[in-house]
Each structure stands twice: as C-alpha cells, then as structure tokens.
Amino acid sequence: MKQFKKAVREYAIWQRFTFVRVNSTPRKYGVQCQVSDCIFCLTGSTHLNYVLVKTFVPDHTCTSTITGIDHPHATFAWVAGECLRLFARPEDTSTMVIIEYIKMQWGVAISYQKAYHAMNIINEIKCGNVEDSYRILPALSVELERTNPSSFVRVFRARDLRPKGDDAFVRMFWTFGPCIRSFNRTLRPLVLVDGTHLLGKYHGVLLIACGVDGNNGLFPLAFAVVENKNEDSWI
C-alpha cells in the first residue's frame, strides 16, 4: 500500500493536479480530484502482496491544473527521496541542483525552502544528524589523540565551565602534534588569531590560531569551536 500511495502522489505531480483522500482505510486507499465536481477518481485495496486497482477514471472535467510553484504533493521528504542518488558526497548537495532536477524530471517547480529542507534530509541520511554528531565528540577526542601522537584535544561541557551545568556541549579545542612541534622548532615567534561564524544548525564560532613560517606562509596551529567570541572563549 505504501508503494501504491507513492505512485498516486507521483501521478498527481506528473499530471499537475491535486487530490484529496476519500474512503481510505489501512487496507483501502482512494483519492479524488480536489475540485468537488471533477470526475477523476482512483481507488485500490491490498490483497496479500499486491494492490488491486478497483476504480480509475483518469479524465478531468476541471481546470485546476497546477502551473505555479510548489506542488503540494511534492513534499520535501519526497523530493529528498527522488534526489538522494544524485549526490555521491554530502558536500556536493545543492539546493539549485535539486530544484533543476525536479523541474527536469517531473515538470514542476519547487520553492527554495522546500529544496533546502530536502537537502537537510539528504545530508542527515548520508552523514547522520547533528545531535548524534555532538554525542560522539568525547569518543572523537580520544580517537584523535590516539591516532595523532602528541595531539591535544579537549571537549568542554556546560558543567565543566559553570556550577550546576549540564552535559550540553559548549566548546571544543584541539591542536595536532605536528603543529605543536612546528611552532616550537621552525616557526617565527608570532601568532595570528581570527574567528569565523559557523552557519550550521547550532551556529557558534570557529577560532583559529596561525603561525608564520620562514617563507612568510601561514601555518595552522590550533582550532576551537566556541559559543561566541568573548574573552573566556579566546583564552
């Protein structure tokens, strides 16, 4: 029945009309055109491992064809499912590619907001959600120090910085062993610091400390993700 419902939705998107459900049960699914006096209707019911189509009147006697943007049956979950195979790597995911692909394949336009939500679903499928990523930070810090000798990684929770704090993530600081050795041995005694705002779900600021080598090139020394720029987080 799930596949049958998906096929009905895609048929409506392809033919550019909207429908409403009628007389639907867990074993039966029926739809008719959103315009009450239109004769279009489609019903089907489950039988063992197949769906039997009982009624199908494909003609429309209305003029409710959708020509504008954002087909209501093209939900962002459906759009994500259609576009998932387009992106081999999460960093290649693009809202404009999603919009153009749905337009080319299905002949309907979707809004930027819908494409953006679909992109987030695709990224979550391929990379996991943001909350799970924060949960593995303590394990990640241990693994970084294990696989990069002499590295230094610290994850700070709210309870580490203030009384009665909880386990919520606040800051993370890390520097790699080669960065430490280069600063001690080959770099000039000069440190440059700067920060840039992060545009993820929980925002924050990425702080970076850089040194200068003998060829006047910038050499990354240390990094930190903090809640905002303030004296405490800089220190």
Image (cartoon, rainbow, N blue to C red):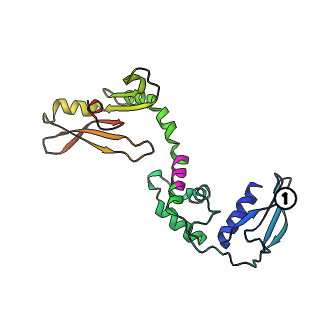
- Residue 192, quarter of the rendered image: top left
Q: Is residue 5 left or right of residue 103?
A: right
Which residue sits at x=37%, y=32%? 171
Amino acid carrying mark 1 in the image: Ser
Quadrant for the C terminus, please: top left
What residue sits right under mark 1 in the picture?
45
Examine the residues drawn in magenta and state their main secondary structure. helix
Between residue 218 and residue 11, name the one nearer to us: 11
Q: Is residue 155 magenta?
A: no
The percent position of residue 121, horizontal first and vertical second, equals 55, 51
Which residue sits at x=75%, y=60%? 4
Q: Categorize mark 1 by other alpha carbons within 10 Å: few (<14), some (14-19), many (20+).
A: some
Residue furthest top as drawn: 163
- Residue 35, quarter of the rendered image: bottom right
Which residue sits at x=39%, y=31%? 144
Secondary structure type for disc 1:
strand
Residue 49, compared with residue 35, is above or below; it is above
Which residue sits at x=52%, y=42%? 129
Between residue 14 and residue 160, name the one nearer to us: 160
The percent position of residue 12, horizontal first and vertical second, equals 69, 68
Q: Is residue 166 left or right of residue 30?
A: left
Residue furthest front as drawn: 36
The percent position of residue 50, horizontal first and vertical second, equals 82, 57
Q: Is residue 175 left or right of residue 9?
A: left
Residue 75, compared with residue 139, is above or below; it is below
- Residue 7, quarter of the rendered image: bottom right
What stretch of residues is rendered in magenta?
Answer: 117-124
Between residue 48 and residue 178, name the one nearer to us: 48
Quadrant for the N terminus, please: bottom right
The percent position of residue 149, horizontal first and vertical second, equals 33, 27
